[in-house]
Image: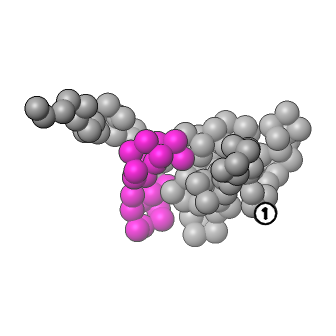
Amino acid sequence: MHENRIIHKDIKPQNIIINPQTKQIQLIDFSTTTKLPKEVAEIRNPNALEGTLAYISPEQTGRMNRRIDYRSDLYSLGITFYELLTRQLPFISQDPIELVHFHIARKPKSLTDYSRPSTTSSL
């Protein structure tokens, strides 16, 4: 996808399908994709952004003065992996503007800060 200069812009768990028999992984919902280099980030209303706010890259918010490229998808994939490992999103807010701010200005809680299940058995 990225070799063809296509940016998905909405990578999230709901858009990743895994075939249990073949273990083949497919990305779905290409409704927000764009072909580079035409994409230019601009300041937008956070209620009208393309993508899902919980997984959106800082560049997609239009508040970073940076062009959107393949790294935007990698950021969203990173959030997906974070959620897979911790069972929660790195940033949670009901306020769209606050959520955009979190993606731009905050670091998520480190994975090492999450408690690990005990691997010792009681005798």
Quarter where residue 72 is shown: top right
**Residue 89 in sight from this viewpoint:** yes
Across and down, in percent, residue 69 comes to: 73, 39
**Residue 43 in sight from this viewpoint:** no
Across and down, in percent, residue 48 comes to: 64, 68
87, 96: nearer the viewer: 87
User: Which residues are the magenta region?
Assistant: 80-100
Across and down, in percent, residue 95 comes to: 42, 67
- Residue at figure coordinates x 70%, y 48% from the top left: 21
Q: Would residue 75 be found to the left or right of residue 96 on screen?
A: right
What residue sits right under mark 1 in the picture? 31
The colour scheme applied to this rendered structure is one colour
- Residue at figure coordinates x 85%, y 33% from the top left: 3
Q: Tell whether position 81 is magenta.
A: yes
Q: What element does badge 1 sit on?
A: loop
24, 31: nearer the viewer: 24
- Residue at figure coordinates x 39%, y 41% from the top left: 108
Few, some or many C-alpha atoms within 10 Å of disc 1 (few <14, some 14-19, many ≥20)?
few
Quadrant that contains the N terminus? top right
Q: Tell whether position 32 is magenta.
A: no
Q: Amino acid at mark 1?
A: Ser
